[in-house]
Amino acid sequence: MEGVMNSAIIISILATGIRLATPYLLAALGEMFTQRSGVYNLGVEGIMMMGAFAGFFATLHSGSPLMGIVASLLIGALMGLLMALVSVTFKAEQGISGIGLYMLGWGLSGLLYRLYVGGITSIDGLKTIKIPLLSDIPFLGPIIFDQNVLVYTALVLVPLSGFILFKTSWGLNVRAVGNKPEAADTLGVSVERIRYQCLILGGMLAGLAGAFLTIGQANMYADNITAGRGFIAIALVYFGRWSPWGILLGSLLFSMADSFQSMVQVLGINFPYELAVILPYVVTIIALAISFGRVWAPAALGKPFQRGTRG
Amino acid sequence: MVEKIQNLEMSGITKRFPGVLSNNNVNIHIVAGEVLAILGENGAGKTTLMNILYGLYQPEAGTISVNGKSVRINSPSEAIQLGIGMVHQHFMLVPTLTVCENVILGLSKTFLVDLKTATKRIKEIMDRYGLAINPEAYVWQLSVGEQQRVEIVKALYRGANLLILDEPTAVLTPQEAKELILLLKNMSAQGNSIILISHKLHEVMAVSDRVTVLRDGEVCADVNTQDTSQEALAKLMVGRDMAPCKRDGKFSPGKPVLELQDVFAKGDMGTNALAGVSLSIREGEILGIAGVSGNGQKELAEVIAGLRKVSKGKLVLNGKESTKMSPAKIIEQGLGYIPEDRLHVGTIPSFSIWENLILKDHNKPPFAKRSLLQNRVIMSHGLSLVEKYGIKTPNLETPTGRLSGGNIQRVILAREITRSPVALVAAYPTRGVDIGATEYLHSKLLEARSNGIGVLLISEDLEELTSICDRIAVLYEGQIMKVMPVEETDERILGLLMAGIVEEASI
Amino acid sequence: MKRVLALILAALTLLAFTGCGTNTNKSAETTPATKVEKVRIALVLPATVDDLAWGQSMVEGLKVVQKTMGADKVEIATSEKLGSAVDAGAAIRQYATQGYDIILAHGSQYQSVLMDIAKDFPKTTFAYGSGFATAPNIFAYDPQAQDGGYLLGILAAMTTKSGIVGIIGPVESGDAVKYNYGVQQGVAKGKADVKSRIAYTGSFNDIVGAGNLAKTQMSAGADILTGSSQQAVGAMRAVAETKGNYWLSTDMDQSSIAPDHVLAAQVYRWEKVVTKIIDLRKQGTLGGQHLILSLADGTIELKYNDKLADKIPAEAKAAVEQAKADIISGKLKVELPKK
């Protein structure tokens, strides 16, 4: 096996791993914000499908993937707003609302595609951008600095999310609202507003994650294009313990394992493919099982906030 | 800028909740530098009144005026702007944030959080009132007393000069309570006004300048503290003469009915919640377990009831080893159990009273014959218990969850005592129960004692423990600090032991 | 308010699903009531009608049938996205109840539900594939995917410059296994030192995953790729982004969206199969036959992309044509995977 794993192959595995990690990273960072504010949005998959469609559709008609990105952010924000309306304002059970949103996103994206596009069509999506100087770094250069703009965005969002969450006033409010909304409420922090903002932000990032699939990878659209990636992103939020760096770690671990197993299959290394395709899941579960330390789930996660009726 | 509250008045306040008139034409007033105690039983409307003052509820009628000007307080933030701060009974702190972050939460309007300036201001406030907490510590790392101080700092940081404290000592050890009282006196001496909500008479006597007594949502007295007494206040609060229960001097315990030998058990977090507990409860005695809750009380009760696994050690119930018995077997072996969570563990809230009364015996005669429930027997049994234990309910079909705390406790007590157990474990039976019901529960526990039942009473209320227990054991961090006959204890010794200080307590 | 919102949401979702779920050919339904003998055909698909693969190839076939026989003679109804056999079962039963004459359950996974349902509708003709088990009113159709695969394999082996042919597999089952096995044999026959490499995504419809797997294949040296199932278009699109790499289609001609990269295609001519089923039914045979799609009867065709004719060496084309003739004449028999 050492023989076939030369450095070009290893670079290919790692570069692919980073590319594969991008949709998980985008969606999971968004979901991290919504969960940090106390709402779990199981509709990420549905939002991603809508984002995938919107990104594809706008790119198809404008010829510019940039318009695709804008469209996916808008539709993601709208879907997040809808989730907020249902789960925050109307206080519907979050799990059910999320699944509803997923179904809606799935059905609606398929319907819109059928109505406005029809058969399989392909687009010119995002091109990779070599970052000058950095892409010349041996080994690391071609792995990290020869990707498309959404990959860079996702990577930059990791430290940025950490900064927003832990250093800004808004981040402080988010953490408070997700852990003890009644405390935030008594101090004049609007629980509803923060949750709306987080759901919209999470929706935008999920939309972007979806757009990455159509305009950053497949350059086409098909029904059920997300194929469960939104649900994996949600799992990665738990894996990452609601921290951006943890989510980065989880996304990379999962995607690197995925990239590795593809290469193992392609190189014809004698390994049952059934086991190969589940390798990413197995690695992630094992990592989760052996990692230690206290789990800090946001204490108010899943609980609609309502001011007490009797003190 | 906040104008200092020189005097504040609430007049004619009326607040209704579905089916309850919580406040009826209530008037209170307070001036700068004064400590006003609002005294009343649970459900008297104290907390509702204070939530109105803090802007959490809107009254149907009545006005609030500050320094002679009428004000409307629509939200907590408006209350804060007026200089009113509130320390809730259940702390409004975010455990995963630091002290400093908790204090500035909601105030920080800049893009970035400026923790440095905030920390400096917090230190200034703490110096002024002699408070000491590390602003960088996470709230979950702090003791309950420290968390309470964070709440006070939080209010002061916002410029509060009228502070409302809702049952502030309910969660504190006696020492912490004493420190709090000193702090409150210090604060009022510096010109702040304090409203203290309480139903603890001695504390009201110790700290307040004036007492307003609420009963059934109405003010029934407004007196200067120095002109009144504990007995007089108790009578005002309950509306009749009180005869506090005391155990009689006779104490002739029999053979041990429940023994714990070097018991270890894990808590929910996986750490040792019980670390080598040895106890022996004998026929006809009440053994009290004192301690701040969270030191293994819950686990102790659960281990005895068979609801939690013993990791090491041995339990003997009524002469048989019960370490590995199932809960059902333990019940059969003669254990009665009044759990801490009376609503969800002690009863099934959606079940009717008659169902809850036979919960442990529904499959045995006379309540069941060949797996069929015997309704006539069950109903007459239920009716007799409702009458005997004074359970206030429209009928036997009422879901138990609809009853008040005191009445639910009566249902459990009725069920457990009529089963004539050999040993009875009661965890915080009077927590959140009003004085009248407390008195009744105490008399029933004493009655059980004179019937030869061995009672284990877990409580945080030292007055309760010293008035009805024969012996008191102090539980601290999963270990028994000491077991003493009640005659050899006082609040000071118990308080020190509850804080884990053994040396000073033995002097 | 909450309830109203929930209802609106539910309605929207339902609309979204049914909107693209069922599609009855209205033009056929609204024909005047003159008693024309009409064949009513219902099609149940695991994926979509426009997947540019298995599903769409059948849809196109039905369109041809309708065109040849006349729109007033054939009515077609389609239900798509019925990947779960249970959901598909409900749709199939409904079509049977509505009196459709022929119900095509276009997937091997529908075999067992069909066996169950067909008993209750003895006068209806059912068909499914790929498969071979039949019943008195069930046809099983069965493309000899390995034959076309074999030809494409020879073509790939003799055209590749890198010496590596990459196969993108969905899941190791059904039609895909037969096709892949045929390609592998063809590659081995075409040129001894050319390697074929198979990798699976573990899914039928993950176009993104298939695209990524194709990229990995290419980075490891493959310059001619192929693969079956509806996810294959994702792999083909990834190939189309590169220069000098080519794709071989199966099920239908996919060159429409990658005209510069699809060299050739194995095409299923479903119209011939469906016409045969219609004819058999007219003669009173409601089922019970195992219908094989093969190069011999023209139900499988090999189609070259004229645009890329110059990319295929002449000897490669000759070798493919020779092999095709041998298969048709029965001289050559492409092996099926064991088991």
Image (cartoon, coloured by chain):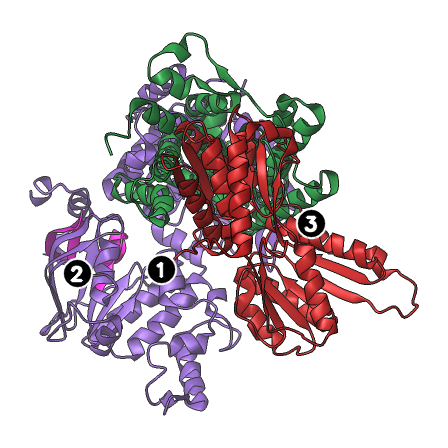
Chain letter for mark 3, please.
C
- Relative to A228, residue B116 above or below: above
- Relative to B7, residue B294 above or below: below
Q: Disc 2 designates what residue?
A: B310
Do the residues marked 1 and 3 share a common chain?
no
Identify residue type, mark 3: Ala
Q: What stretch of residues is rendered in magenta? A: B456-485
Q: Secondary structure at mark 2?
A: loop
Query: Would you say residue B437 sits in the magenta stretch?
Result: no
Q: Looking at the colours in the rendered structure, which chain would you say is drawn in purple?
A: B
Q: Looking at the colours in the rendered structure, which chain would you say is drawn in red?
A: C
What color does chain A have in the rendering?
green
Q: Mark 2 and mark 3: span between their CA atoms?
A: 56 Å
Identify residue type, mark 2: Val
Image location (x, y in percent) of residue C155: 50, 38
Foreground of the two, A231 or A265: A265
Image location (x, y in percent) of residue B133: 29, 27
- The answer to whether any part of residue B358 appears in the image is yes
Q: Residue at x 31, y 41 (%)?
A: A283
Identify residue type, mark 1: Asp
Q: Disc 3 designates what residue?
A: C16
